[in-house]
């Protein structure tokens, strides 16, 4: 079996697609779910809308994590000089970032929706909401960190023998 088969870049690009699509789906869900709560809040207390946009902004940051990992992985894919090891590492890095982004976006959406609705009735909930959102956001950050570490290990991975 070859160390650098011609299909090895497929796995790297699958990592690129996984990081970008999964983290974007998480960000979209978080934005939509929190946006529903903000729309409900706006009907009763429009002056609180600006402070309630925090979940939407935090959900959008999740997609940026996927974008960063996708750009870094795609920059490391060199046709003809790309090992199967690097392909699998890049696939794992993309899945790590994408799946944690999906989970973080889901958590941000649910927390954002519930807390924004509670914020209408009791404004003391705001600090608790921000803390819970930070803990939900850090899930995506963990995936970004793991993906960056994995990408670094792929750079020094198996070298293709010169033909």
Image: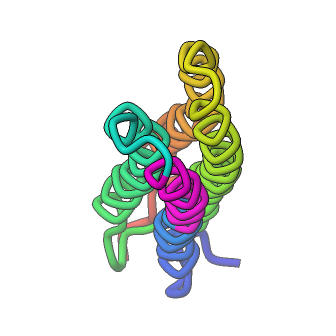
Q: Which residue occupies 68% across, 53% down?
A: 106
In the image shown, does 47 or 18 lie closer to the viewer? Answer: 47
Residue 156 x %, y % = 44, 41
Does residue 39 show up magenta in the picture? yes
User: Would you place residue 35 above or below residue 80 in this image?
Assistant: above
Q: In which quarter of the image is residue 115?
A: top right
Horizontal relation, residue 82 to residue 15: left or right: left
In the image shown, does 78 or 40 lie closer to the viewer? Answer: 40
Q: Considering the image in quadrants, where does the C terminus appear?
A: bottom left
Residue 157 x %, y % = 51, 47
Residue 82 x %, y % = 43, 68
Inspect this view and state whether residue 41 appears: yes
Horizontal relation, residue 107 to residue 54: left or right: right
Q: Which residue occupies 55% across, 19% down?
A: 123
Does residue 33 show up magenta in the picture? yes
Which residue is at the far bottom?
A: 6
Q: Which residue occupies 71% across, 78% down?
A: 1
Q: Principal SS element in the magenta part? A: helix
**Segment colored magenta:** 25-43
Residue 147 x %, y % = 54, 43
Q: Quadrant of residue 117?
A: top right
User: Would you place residue 29 above or below residue 132 in this image?
Assistant: below
Colouring of the image = rainbow
């Amino acid at each position: 079996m070859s160390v650098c088969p011609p299909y090895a870049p497929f796995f790297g690009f699958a990592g690129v697609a996984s990081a970008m699509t999964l983290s974007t789906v998480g960000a979209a869900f978080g934005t939509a779910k929190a946006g529903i709560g903000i729309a409900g809040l706006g009907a009763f207390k429009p002056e609180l809308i600006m402070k309630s946009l925090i979940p939407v902004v935090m959900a959008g940051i999740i997609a940026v994590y996927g974008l960063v990992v996708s750009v870094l992985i795609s920059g490391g894919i060199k046709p003809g000089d790309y090992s199967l090891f690097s392909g699998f590492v890049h696939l794992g890095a993309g899945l790590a970032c994408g799946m944690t982004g999906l989970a973080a976006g889901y958590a941000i959406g649910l927390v954002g929706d519930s807390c924004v609705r509670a914020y209408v009735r009791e404004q003391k909930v705001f600090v608790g909401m921000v803390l819970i959102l930070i803990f939900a956001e850090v899930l995506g950050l963990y995936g970004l960190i793991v993906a960056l570490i994995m990408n670094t290990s792929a750079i020094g991975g198996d070298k293709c023998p010169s033909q």
